[in-house]
Amino acid sequence: MLTCPLSNVMHQQTTVMTPRKTASMHNCKLKLKKLPRHDMLVIMGDLNVKVGTDNLSYDRAMGKEGCGNMNENGERLAELCAAYNLVIGGTIFPHRDIHKLTQCSPNSGDRNQIDHLVINGTWGRSLLDVNVRREADVGSDHHLVMVYVKLKLRSTR
């Protein structure tokens, strides 16, 4: 029997540092410390985080295939990933920008890569690809993020 425990460890980030955001980040760190290291951890969604392409300080937490420049939330996420052996999946695989940009602002036409998938480092090699599907009509200014994962599961007796 395969069990898949779920935990809500993060909420949508805002661009301004607030006491609520600080408390949420602290709560996230507490939950990450309690999770078993051998379990697969996946954090995904609209994190409102721009991680960019510069991974100089965070080479274990992210690749060089992001889009744009890192913002303050991106620094926080990269620091969290480096501290807890997590990997930002959308920065690993080379694609054209059109297949990496996850959000298109309806009024200004700005395009951003702010929807991310984060996986713990021990399962990082299980990621085969992360890309954006623009043809999926989801009724949002965000595009569908597709993740391909290869798992090798052992039977339990």
Image (spheres, rainbow, N blue to C red):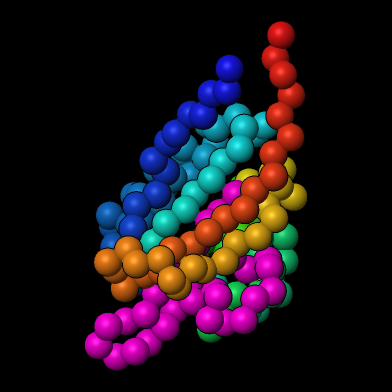
Instruction: Please determine whether, in this image, residue 10 is positioned above or below residue 93.
Output: above
Residue occupying the far top of the picture: 157
Magenta residue check for 93: yes
Which segment is the magenta one? 90-119
Q: Residue at x 55, y 32 (%)?
A: 35
Instruction: Please determine whether, in this image, residue 50 is positioned above or below residue 77.
Output: below
Which corner quadrant of the image does residue 157 belong to?
A: top right
Q: Nearer the viewer, residue 37 or 139?
A: 139
Q: Name the spot of residue 3 as percent of width and height, x first.
A: 53, 23
Total numbered circles? 0
Q: Residue at x 68, y 66 (%)?
A: 92
Residue 156 visible in the shown view: yes
- In the displayed structure, does residue 15 sit left or right of residue 148? left
Q: Name the spot of residue 107 as percent of width and height, x first.
A: 25, 88
Residue 86 visible in the shown view: no
Q: Name the spot of residue 58 as percent of width and height, x first.
A: 67, 66
Q: Nearer the viewer, residue 125 or 83?
A: 125
Q: Residue at x 60, y 62 (%)?
A: 130
In which quadrant of the rendered image does the N terminus lie?
top right
- In the displayed structure, does residue 13 sit left or right of residue 28? left
Residue occupying the far bottom of the picture: 108
Magenta residue check for 4: no
Q: Residue at x 68, y 68 (%)?
A: 93
- In the displayed structure, does residue 60 sit left or right of residue 51? right
